[in-house]
Amino acid sequence: MNFDFSKEPGKKLEKIDFENMSGLEPLISIIMPFYNDKEHIEQTINSLLNQTFPAFEILIIDDGSNDKESIEKLKEIQKLDSRIKVHHKENGGAAVARDYGVSKTAKNSKYIVFCDSDDLLNKTYLETAFWTLETNQTASWAYTDSIGFEGTEYTWNKWFDSNKMKKENDLVITSMIKKDDFNEVEGFNINEKNVYEDWNLWLKLIAKGHFPVHMNYYGCWYRRKAESELNRARENNERAMEIINATAKTIKGDIKAKQYPLFNYDWDIIKDEVKSIPSVKRSENNKINLLMIIPWMVMGGADQFNFDLISRLDKSKYDITIISTEPAVNTYRQAFEDYATVYDLSTFLDQKYWVAFINYIIEKNNINIILNTNSEFGYGMLPYLKAKHQNIPIIDYVHMEEWYNRNGGYSRDSSGVASVLDKTLVCNENSRKILIDHFGRNEKEVETVYIGVDEKKFDPSKYDRDKLKEKYNLPKDKYIMSFICRISEQKRPMLLLEVIKKLKETRDDFVVLIIGDGNLLNKMKSTAKKYNLLNNMIFMGRTNKTDEIYDVSDLTINCSIKEGLALTAYESLAMGVPVVSSDVGGQKELIDENTGVIVPCMQEEEDIFDFNYSEEEVQNYVDAINKILANLKKYKQNCRKKILNGFTIDQMVIRMSNILKNIANEPNKQKKIESDNIDICKELITNRLINISEKYGWEAKEYNSYFGFSIDDIEGYKFELFKEKMWQHKWYRGIIRFLQKTGIMKQLKKLTNM
C-alpha cells in the first residue's frame, strides 16, 4: 500500500475532551513562528488541538506580520483554546522568533516543540515523544520520521549518524527538546536569516555530547512550499555553510542516538507505572471504549479481519484504541488511523515500559473491554491486566492453531490464559472443537465468528470478464486457475507445481495465475522452468486488484498445510468462483460439495519445510480440478449464494458488536486473579519477553534493513538461537531447516561469531 499524502492531519478540528483541564500545567511548550501565513495556520493549530495528550501550551510568535488578514486570523485562532497564547514582536527571522518564544514558556514546562505555522503533527506525536523522553532521561530530544507534502511528496526515514550530520542534515525542526538542554547551548542564538539554523542547533547539541531518540513512525508533516526557509537558505548557501562548518568543527567523537525499533530487554524489572507521567483522563463518552492489542498493521487475512472490524463498528457507539507490539513496516497504519487511535509500542518505548503505557491508556481512555488477537506480548500480559483491572472484561480472537509453532501457536497462548478470558472467539468451528477437545476449554466460553467478506466489493456483476482478460492478456480459449497467496512454506507452492505437472500430462487447456510474492517465489519460478511449465503459468506478483483476478478465474486453488479459514476462499466464492482446497482448518465449513472440492492434507505440519509430496495427494488435487472443470456451471451457480447466506463482513460485524456489547455491559466480575498476585504476573511478562527476544530482534533487524540501515548499527541485537534442549522439538528443527535453506542461518552465524 502506497502512502496516502491526502490524509493530512488537522483538516478538521476534532479536539478531545479531558477532565480537570483547568488544573493541568503545561509540560510541553509548542513554539510557532508566524509571518503572514493566514492560509495554513488553522490546519496546523487543528493538528495540535487534536492531540491525544493535553498538557501543552501553544506560543504563536508573530514575527512582525504586516498583513491585516493574517493578524485577524491570529485573533480568531487565539479564541479557540485557552492554551493558545499570541506574542507580537518586530521581524527578526524564524530563529530569533523561536528563541523569543522559549523565553516566554511556562516556568514548569519541561520540553519544547518547534512547529512551523504550515507544518502538521500526527495526533499522538506529543504523547509518544513525551513518553519517549520521560523513559530515556539521558536523551536530549526526540523526533519521528517525517512526510514531505504539497510541493514535493516523499516519506523521510533516516538512520541518525552524527558524523553524517556534519555534512548533511537529515532532521527537520519539528522535534521535542528538553528545555534545559536547549538553554544550555543558548538556543539558536543566530540573528541572521536563512542560514540552516535548525541544522546548526542539532550540531550544537551534539557538540555538547547530547543525543536524540529516533521514533520510527511518520509523526511530522513538513510542507514543501516553493518559497520556504529551506529554499531561501539554499540561496544563501555559502554563508549558511560557514556557520555550519564552524559548529561542526567543535564536535569531538561519534555521538550515538537511540533508535527504535530495538530489543534491549534483559531481565529488567517490568515498570507498571512511570510516576513522572501526569494522570490525564478523557471525559466519559458513554461508548464502549475498546482496546485492541495486535501484532502489526500489515495486510494478511488476520490483519484484514482487524481492519474490517474497526472500520465497520458504529463510531457513535464505539471508541477504539489500537496498540501494536511487533516491529514491522506498517503499510496499513494510515488506514487503521482513519478509525482508531494507534500506538505502535515498538516505535517509541523500551519493552520494560510497555505495561506502564498500557495501564496509562486504560485509565486515560476509560477502556471498558480488551480484545487481544495474535499478539504474543499481549497474551503474556493478559494475566497482569486482569489482576490490575479486575472489572474490565478480556476477550481474544484466534485465527488458527499451528502445531509447528509452539505446539499450537495462538491457540496454546489463548488456552494458557483461559482463566482470565471472558470469551475466546475463533474463525471456524474446527478451531473451536480443537480448543474444547484438545486444550480442555469451557465450551460456553468459546464461540465461532466467521471473518466474512465484503460481498459488495467482491461482486461479479460489476465486472466485464472479456475486457479483463484483454487487460491481463489472458487466453480466451483456456481455463484460468488462480493461486493467490503469500509464496511461502505454509501455502505449499511447490506442491502446486507437482499438481500442474501431473495435470499437464492429460490436458493442456489451462493457465495458472500465480498472485503474490514471498521467500519461495524464486524457487518456484526456477522449478517451473525446470519442469517445462512456464507455458501454463503466469507469475503476476502482488496486486491489490484481486477482485479482477477472481473474475477472470474459473477456479482457485489452495494447497496450504495450515489455515484458519482462508480469506481467499471467502473472496473466491463471493465472486462466484469455486475452490479446490486442502482439508485444513475450517475450509470445509465454507467449501462444500456445491462450492468446490476439499482435498485431504497428507503431510504433517512439522514437515512444512519438506517439499517431497505423496503421489496420492498430488493426484487428489488433479482429480478435484478435473471434477470442477467438468461441472463448472453448476459450481459457479452456488458459490455466491453460500457467502450471502451467512459469510459477509456485515454479518460478522453485527455478531462481533453484539458480543462486545453484551460482555462490556455484563462483564464477568469474578476475581480470577487476586490483586496481590500482580508481581507474579509481571514476572510472567518478563519470561514472555525473554522467550520472544530472538523473534523480536530479527523483526527489528528486518525493519531497519528495509530502510537500508546496517545490522551493525542496531543496538541490542542479540541472538541466542542454538539451545540444545530445543533440538528435540520437531517444529524447532523445522525452523532451523528453514533458516538453513533461506540463507538466514549463514547470516546468523556471521552475526553471532558461531
Image: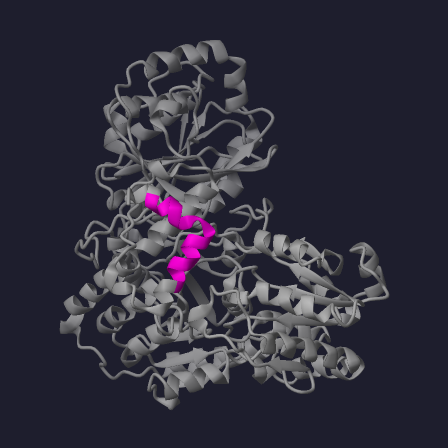
Q: How far from the left and from the top, in percent, is residue 378?
A: 33, 65
Residue at point 36%, 29% (across, down): 161
Residue 496 in sight:
yes
The relative height of residue 364 versus residue 87 in the rendered view (above or below) is below
438 on left or right of 646: left
Looking at the image, which is closer to me, 496 or 347? 496
The relative height of residue 734 versus residue 148 in the rendered view (above or below) is below
Looking at the image, which is closer to me, 699 or 544? 699
706 on left or right of 152: left
In this view, which residue lies farthest toward the left? 676
Residue 283 in sight:
no
Q: How far from the left and from the top, in percent, is residue 191?
A: 38, 14
The relative height of residue 446 versus residue 53 in the rendered view (above or below) is below
What coloring was used for the rendering? Answer: one colour
Residue at point 67%, 83% (across, down): 642
258 on left or right of 424: left
Quadrant of the snapshot with the C terminus: top left
Which corner quadrant of the image does residue 381 belong to? bottom left
Q: Is residue 509 magenta?
A: no
The magenta stretch is 734-749
Residue at point 34%, 37% (across, down): 712
Q: Main secondary structure of the magenta part?
A: helix
Looking at the image, which is closer to me, 301 or 553? 553
Q: How far from the left and from the top, in percent, is residue 112?
A: 32, 35
Q: How far from the left and from the top, in percent, is residue 583?
A: 55, 80
Residue at point 24%, 46% (across, down): 135
